[in-house]
Image: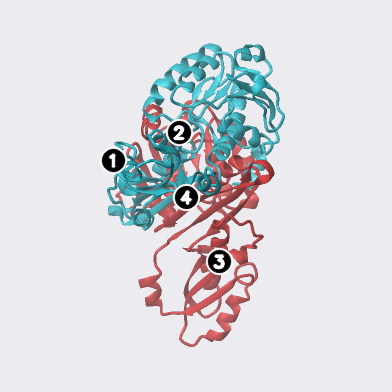
Chain colours: A cyan, B red
Amino acid sequence: MKIAIYGYGNLGRGVEAAIAYHTDCELVGVFTRRSPESVKTVSGAPVYSAADIGDFKDKIDVLILCGGSATDLPEATPMLSADFNVVDSFDTHAKIPEHFEKVNNAALKSGHVALISAGWDPGLFSIARLYASAALPSGKDYTFWGRGVSQGHSDAIRRIEGVVDARQYTVPVPEALEAVRDGGTPTLTTGQKHRRECYVAVEESADKALIEEKIKTMPNYFADYETTVNFVSVEELRTNHSGMPHGGSVIRNGVTGEGGRNTHTIEFSLRLDSNPEFTASVLVSSARAVYRMAERGDFGCKTLFDIAPRDLSPLSPEEQRRLLL
Amino acid sequence: MKIAIYGYGNLGRGVEAAIAYHTDCELVGVFTRRSPESVKTVSGAPVYSAADIGDFKDKIDVLILCGGSATDLPEATPMLSADFNVVDSFDTHAKIPEHFEKVNNAALKSGHVALISAGWDPGLFSIARLYASAALPSGKDYTFWGRGVSQGHSDAIRRIEGVVDARQYTVPVPEALEAVRDGGTPTLTTGQKHRRECYVAVEESADKALIEEKIKTMPNYFADYETTVNFVSVEELRTNHSGMPHGGSVIRNGVTGEGGRNTHTIEFSLRLDSNPEFTASVLVSSARAVYRMAERGDFGCKTLFDIAPRDLSPLSPEEQRRLLL
């Protein structure tokens, strides 16, 4: 299966690394909007200009789009679905219906498969929510994120005047997590489920108290959460906070039997050393499913909800039944 | 969707109870090999003789087979696939290929969908193993069962002379579970992962020491495990051990990145108050998928690996994307 990467940031490098583990995949190359000469890949894979992607129509089985959801993917996914089978990790939840519609039109028209919103959330967490709600129709879902680095929240802190660099960890509130794991169905706001831990390096002359105040009162990002701010050196950020760990849990508590007398807890959890590398690995296994669906002529826009699990695995159906069932 | 139940033991009663929660389903009736007059259903659903099932060919969308894997299902599933779309929970792992083949032939010939080995293990645990191995090709899987009642082990104790009744709990060894949850990849036998807790009521004249010895040395069932035997009264068994709780965890630890520098842990866990009621609820959501696949003419024998998650949910694809993605 011939894979190409479109966009070469953290996620693109993650896909490049993942392909070494998915041994039925071969990396054709990396496409970038930067000057190709300025980009060096980790594996030595060739780098091409995004403008030349049209020359590769018959040389790529699946193109994995590694751009951002804010501005890149809304344009790139429908456009590239006209010529390629694609996978993206679009995660702007409110805009998924619009994205789906545009991508679906392009992919159906051109006869391609376009899988959107793959990864872990949206992605494996979404699948866990679906299986759990199907198995326990009467119940309540909870999603906890973390402990992990939120890029969006880190960026929000970096935009404050006087801040040199910052790293924000989203952390599940242990009491809330335990209450749900114990089978309870409390009503919890996102702010009651999570707290926010910030590590901030500031300019020498900066007013730390003012910066802390600005962080803690920032609407949407921090105001509704218990937030702690730790001022650290740039060096300490680099040494102790350069990783991109993440994870979390999807938990559903539900009942069965007469009068709901029996309670059941379903939990799906991830603990990830590297968010982009794990997400990338899910994207590569998703590309395998896209390739198989394209071979069968099952075109259009898909999400992981539309993918039979067996299409994600490199094993044959017989091997899957023997080794995994 | 018109559902019927074939076999009315714990699992059959579980399906009957589950249908009240799966509101797009209607229970046509229960089929039994006993005399129908001797069986009274909890919900008041009609009871028919298994011998008359042929009269219901056009009145049942999906037939849920609630017999045992040892002798019932190997006969019943292929036979009934000739006239019905069916779901079973066949769990004799070594015989799945043979069962699949026989059921597939019957279902393809008659134009029906037959889903085998649905439930939680095989079932949701199998799916968790598949997604995890697809996401992390380089890694190691662990399945822990319990704390939960094993019917097979309880029965094995009951067959010992002098035993009146017994209940056996399979319990994960906490140290093994923690080592795996911490990201380790130890080599563990089933006996190192689980211990066995037995509650046994015996005849007044019974030789307890001999019975304990017979349990602990029983090959396959107990000899390879740390086993504790507690002698209790029949009354205590009834009062404190009449439930059928179960559960467990599927955990995969795997690596990504250059030289496998990043470790990731994927865990799927269940804690079930009632094993048969939960299994039954999975069977009913599986029946929904079978119905939809039959409508599309996608005939033959299937496992949950072949079922796109969306087909299990009562929600429309648009609702799924809006509420669960």
Where is the N terminus of chain A found, in terms of image quarters? top right
Q: Nearer the viewer, mark 1 or mark 3?
A: 1
C-alpha separation, residue under disc 1 versus residue under disc 2: 44 Å
Q: Amino acid at mark 2?
A: Asp
Q: N-terminal of the two: label 3 or label 4?
A: 4
Q: Amino acid at mark 3?
A: Glu
SS category of the residue bearing label 2? helix
Q: Residue at x 45, y 20 (%)?
A: A74
Residue under circle 3? Answer: B175
Which residue occupies the foreground of this view, A183 or A72?
A: A72
Chain holding disc 2? B
Which residue occupies the foreground of this view, B255 or A268?
A: B255
Q: Nearer the viewer, mark 2 or mark 3?
A: 3
C-alpha separation, residue under disc 1 versus residue under disc 3: 44 Å
C-alpha separation, residue under disc 3 versus residue under disc 4: 36 Å
As drawn, the residue found furthest toward the right would be A44
Tag 1 near tag 3, CB within 8 Å: no
Residue under circle 2? Answer: B311
Q: Amino acid at mark 4?
A: Cys
Assess disc 2: are there few (<14), some (14-19) or many (≥20) residues with their C-alpha within 10 Å of its C-alpha: many
* Res A257 label: none
Which residue occupies the foreground of this view, B30 or B224?
A: B224
Q: Residue at x 56, y 41 (%)?
A: B131
> Whole-percent x and y of residue A148?
46, 45
Assess disc 1: are there few (<14), some (14-19) or many (≥20) residues with their C-alpha within 10 Å of its C-alpha: some
